[in-house]
Amino acid sequence: MMATVPILLAGTLTVTGAVAPVNATPAAERKPAKPKTTLGSTVRAAVAAATSTVKTQAASATPTTYTVKAGDTVSSIAGRYGLATASVLALNGLGWKSLIFPGQVLKLTSGSVAPTASTAPVATTGGRYTIQKGDTISRIAARFGVSTQSVLTANGLSWSSIIYPGQTIAIPGATLAAENVSSVTPTTGVDESGDPASTPVVSTPAPVLTTSYLIKSGDTISSIAKKFGVGIQSILDANGLGWSSIIYAGRSLTIPGVNVVQDGSTVTPLSSEMAANARIIVQIGRELGVPDRGIVIALAAAMQESSLRNIDYGDRDSLGLFQQRPSTGWGTREQILNAPHAARLFYGGPSNPNAGVTRGLLDIPGWQSMSLTQAAQAVQISAYPNAYAKWETSATAWLAQLG
């Protein structure tokens, strides 16, 4: 055997003083030992106490969430706060190969941040938040305990988008009860007597939009690609997979270029023309005080009638976003092709430009309790009364994106 053990033993004995050098002074001639003091033990106790205090303070100072900065890794963040990397990964639904990005908000503890009087968010119904001076998307996301990416996705924003005080954004999956926010808003429509209705209307919650799909039992890459109308190769590339890769139920796949709602359905993307017209419908609805549900109905109706395009043709003399007809009293050709005017005609109510001639949504008794397709049909009187329902998910998502 090698002489490793004797060398280590000799070193140990030398350090502890168990073996005296050959030329050591005899014991009788040694200088008297200095009297023992308690200084060493006192210092050790003080150091131990200080170390314990630092550890206690570090533990108590661990924030509930942490906003990722350039150069961060999950392990470095966990180490900074004395946490296990595995626990941080599990708390955020991440794997050991998951990537994190600057601005992303990670949960560090399972607790939630209780809003204080000075930082409590100002929110409206339907999971929406009104931006305050000094806000950032990441700060808002952290306040509501959701990821920055989910807020960006739900509002059609990117990491470079700019937000402004007074602007409202959707908070996907946020529970606003802590801010004493009601889940209903009063309608500004009219009841059967013609007086403003006071019945509360439940607002349609903003859907949670992501680019991920949760794999279900029986799924294949090809069936998922067909479901979302994308190419198999694009899914493989987006997820670092090959044609021989195996997928498993319960795991997530990135679906490139598609907004996926929690229930697995998709949202029809808006072209620039469609988005511009949708913004007009939303803006007029906001000006009239129409609840979110009413705006969703208007967006779905316009999508069905004109694909959200202000077209100057249609069935017989139908025109514009909602395919309103001059021959049935909706107005002149010029009026109907004026998108804001057409939206006011659809909403109707106390500000109906055609009061007493045509009925808008707010003029329909009980529209709040109707299904989307029933409410839209009551205004449009379409030959295809069930056609509006298929746009409900997309219309809800568009409202969340456009505000």
Image (cartoon, rainbow, N blue to C red):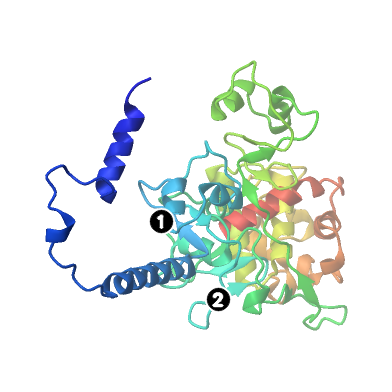
* Quadrant housing the C terminus: bottom right
Q: Give the numbered dot on residue 80.
A: 1
Residue displayed at 18% across by 57% down: 27
- Residue plotted at (56% across, 42% down): 271
Is residue 310 shown to the viewer in this render? no
Say what amino acid the circle numbered 2 marks: Pro
Q: Is residue 387 above or below residue 372?
A: above
Where is 207 relative to 358, above or below? above
- x, y percent for residue 328: 79, 57
- Labelled disc at residue 34: none
Residue 306, above or below 294:
above
Residue lying farthest to the top in this orientation: 244
- The residue identified by callout 2 is 115
Q: Position of residue 33 (x, y in %)?
A: 19, 67
Which of 109 and 289 lies nearest the eye of the viewer? 109
The quarter holding residue 380 reads bottom right
Quarter of the image for residue 134 reads bottom left
